Image (cartoon, rainbow, N blue to C red):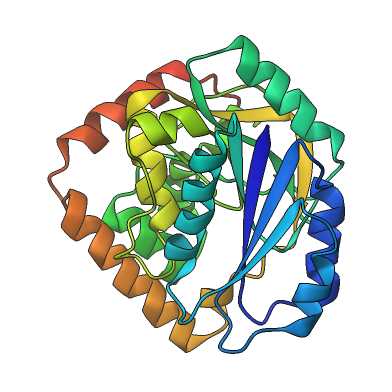
Amino acid sequence: MITASIVLYNTDIGQLKAVIDSYRPSAERRLYLIDNSAERNEQYETIVSSENISYIHNEKNCGYGGAHNIGIKSAILEKSDYHIVLNPDLEFEPKIIDELVSYADENKDVVYMLPKVVYPNGELQYLCKLLPTPADLIFRRFLPDVGVFKKMNDRYILKNTGYDHIMNPPCLSGCFMFMRTGALAENQIFFDERFFMYCEDFDLMRRLHRVGKTLFYPHVTIIHKHEKGSYKNKKMLFMHIISACKYFNKYGWFIDKERYVVNKNILSSVRHIDS
């Protein structure tokens, strides 16, 4: 069995239907819709037309990770083989999930997989990353992508690998998190609810990478309508900064031995092409 969760917060109903159609719920693909909106939404409830979709409205907004923890814990109770954290702004062919399952079934050391991710126009999104340093996040957000800053960012996002082969980076996007449910349960890995929004995926991925392979799998593709909210909204930017501070308070700002070792290993193992 496969399970998946989508966190809602005043989410557009058309957008939600598109990702649900992509996932294609069934008896073997359970779906949890977890609503952090202030009020119950009757439109969301109308989507729950089968027993394969569950709608859960939270009494308060418990954050992105906190809401997905409800889905993860439900997946563990259901004893699903794999659980997928889905953003509501995705579209993909339903069959890609079967290919991810097939690969993970054959490779038991894999605990996480991310497909190739593109924008609606087909442009590649560079979502494989090293474990971030404060400089990586600051330069990426506030300084121009030219000269030495571009080289630093290209290194951080592993851009010169070509994104054309399977890699095992320590940090991957949280837009589509295909995870082995047993690994989450056995290692008690859940989202850290101190992160209300932003960096919760970095933190979860880091802990998953300790117990198994966290793979970029480019042989299947999904479309992500990435909005980059913190680039457009000052409130979202402030939330992003607060979460980044929490992340570095947890793991270390300038002294982080695990980051040094993990990043060194991935840089020595990946194949690079000329930029």
The foreground one among 161 and 227 is 227
Query: Which picture quadrant has residue 79?
Result: top right
Query: 78 left or right of 223?
Result: left
The foreground one among 233 and 196 is 196
Outermost residue on the front side: it is 51
Q: How many marks?
A: 0
User: Where residue 172 sits in the image (x, y, percent)?
Assistant: 51, 42
Query: 223 left or right of 236?
Result: right
Residue in the image at 57% along x and 12% along y: 107
Quadrant of image for the N terminus: top right
Outermost residue on the left side: it is 255
Residue 26 visible in the picture: yes
Outermost residue on the top side: it is 106
User: Where residue 219 sits in the image (x, y, percent)?
Assistant: 76, 26
Quadrant of image for the C terminus: top right
Q: Is residue 220 above or below residue 117?
A: above
User: Where residue 18 sits in the image (x, y, percent)?
Assistant: 85, 61
Q: Is residue 196 above or below residue 145?
A: below
User: Where residue 5 sits in the image (x, y, percent)?
Assistant: 62, 54
Residue in the image at 61% along x and 43% along y: 84
Residue 122 visible in the picture: no
Q: Is residue 34 above or below residue 42?
A: above
